[in-house]
Image (cartoon, rainbow, N blue to C red):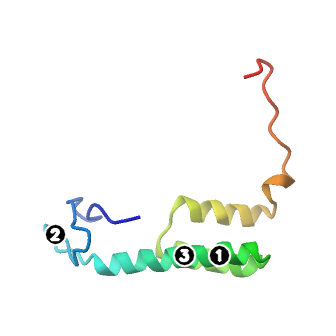
Amino acid sequence: MPLERCPNCRARVEAHAGQCRRCEMELDLLRRTQEAANALRQEAVARLAAGDRSAAEEALRKARALHADPLCESLLGYLRTGGAPSDRPAPRPDATGS
């Protein structure tokens, strides 16, 4: 996800600005950190697809340390429960049929 606002002062930032024009926060380092976290999440998904749950969990923990996001938390929750969605019973439709 591209950085649209400075996380420090919320000023709009240029697409490739190295620092915030308002508060001068370093943005390149933040972008590189987010890119590293994204690469670790992609690695985790590949490891999970290959059946290596422990390596997937390790990569997700590293990604979360760099940049926590809902996808990372969901994948860690999936690994903690130890089950695939097909292992859980399907939700029942309610009595009204909706």
Mark 2 or mark 1: which comes first in sequence? 2
38 to 78, vertically: above or below: below
Residue under the image location 21 percent in, 60 percent down: 12
Q: Is residue 90 left or right of residue 75?
A: right
Q: Position of residue 42 (x, y in %)?
A: 59, 74
Q: Name the residue that disc number 1 marks.
A: 44
Residue located 16% across and 69% down the image: 23
Q: Callout 3: 10 Å neighbours few (<14), some, many (20+)?
A: many
First in sequence: mark 3 vs mark 2: 2
User: Which residue type does callout 2 highlight?
Assistant: Cys
Tag 3: amino acid: Ala
Q: Is 39 in front, or is 53?
A: 39
In the rendered structure, the answer to whether residue 76 lies left or right of residue 34 reads: right
Q: Give the label on residue 23, or none.
A: 2
Is 10 situated left or right of 73 in this image? left
Residue drawn at x 22%, y 65% as measured from the top left: 13
Mark toward the viewer: 2 or 1: 1
Q: Which residue is mark 3?
A: 63
Extreme residue toward the left, this view: 22
- Which percent across, then down, holds residue 75? 66, 64
Q: Quadrant of residue 73?
A: bottom right
